[in-house]
Image (cartoon, rainbow, N blue to C red):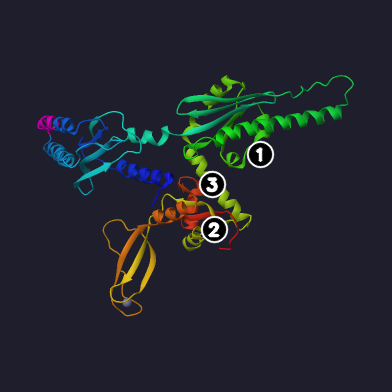
Amino acid sequence: MVESDAHKKYEFKRTLEVLRSKRGRGTELISLYIPHDKQIHEVAAQLREEFGQASNIKSRVTRQNVTGAIESLLSRLKLIPKAPENGVVIFCGAVDIGANKTDMETYIIEPPDPLVSYKYHCDSSFLLTPLEDMLHEKKTYGLLVLDRREATVGVLRGKHIEVMAHLTSNVPGKQRKGGQSSHRFQQLRLIAINEFYTRIADAASEVFLGIDQKDFEGVFIGGPSPTKEEFESGEFLHHEIQKKILGLFDVAYTDESGLNELFDKLGEALQNVEVVQEKKIAERFLKELVNDTGLASYGEEQVRKNLQMGSVDTLLLSDQLRKVRLTIKCSNCDFEEKKTITKKLGDEEYQPGNCKKCGSSLKVAESVDIVEELSAIADQMGTNTSFISSDFEEGNQLLTAFGGIAAILRFKTGI
Ligand code: ZN
């Protein structure tokens, strides 16, 4: 099964969420970052040194927890002869589980991008910033600044802007020459503006469609008002790019310095990009639903049917969805059924009861996270999967009113 990038990212984010919630009583949670090139025996030597120093810790409980964690790390390291290609991160420590109790927990993570530096970190929480940064760094944005005379197209990667295209127009100024009728002049001017917008859009669309789409987050447009608004509402860009407009900003320049000016203004907008995109997708779904276009589908069964038909353009999954899909089989006859249940916290096992056909006991043959099950079908069918957070109104609505599973369809299916 090929895992989609959106899915991997979702899993990674969820793992970080779990780690972020862990707390030690004292400074006793250890984060160990080992890049690919780091020799494991050197890491072990340093850990033994830390073990020696930990014997000086005054609090008996903290001392025991730290030395316990280091011992656990050392035994894990024996199983890793060499760090994998992107390195490996091991989190270990006595985690506070309430009721005056702690539990020694260990997490081993292979990061999505290569680790740059070795780190041994001991604190009351796990060190996550190097992993959190990986979620943001790879993002690529399209930048476009324009007015009626000039336009510049750029690509923003991390903090680096690359200029990709520069265009100028021959749109006449507002003053007409003598002898020309005012009406005719205005008409010609509008045609020229329209032509220029089309040229800008063609150049920008070509550049932005050429970016690896899995890293491409969207487009920011800068320029004076009302030019940029006019350009946006005229939908000149390729429809795939038009969908990805993230925001409009007032910018005075429309040459290369305009791209820098636009970048300076993005600030918070860049931080909120994910939420903005999720909001757009959720809004699109709600719009299709309200307008009764037949292109909105929701509910687990309906969406699964549509997915299997290949009719889903975008699959919307709430990132709060906690359900598993069970395959239940009879221990005696050939009876088999599938069932979705809410994932329980803790170790509570699902009891499937007895067979309807022969009365023998049923057993759970397979248990798959529903997010994995549905996004696997989506991947096979070339469907985009979007994980929608419930931090904003439409996202919360997706979870509470639609069970966290919805779809925007490519064509009507009546399901
Ligand atoms: Zn049976």
Instruction: Name which of mark 1 and mark 3 comes first in the sequence.
Output: 1
Residue 281 image label? 3
Q: Quadrant of residue 374?
A: bottom left
Q: Secondary structure at mark 3?
A: helix
Q: Position of residue 372 (x, y in %)?
A: 39, 54
Rendered residue at 40%/45% (across/down): 10
Asked if residue 92 lies left or right of residue 18, the reply is: left
Q: Main secondary structure of the magenta part?
A: helix
Dot 2 amino acid type: Ser
Q: Position of residue 6 (x, y in %)?
A: 43, 45
* Residue 5 in the image: above or below residue 350: above
Q: Quadrant location of the C terminus?
A: bottom right
Cα separation between marks 2 and 1: 26 Å
Rendered residue at 52%/57% (across/down): 310
Dot 1 amino acid type: Glu
Instruction: Name which of mark 2 and mark 1 comes first in the sequence.
Output: 1
Q: Which residue is mark 1?
A: 235
Dot 3 amino acid type: Ile
Residue 297 image label? 2
Instruction: Name which of mark 2 and mark 3 comes first in the sequence.
Output: 3
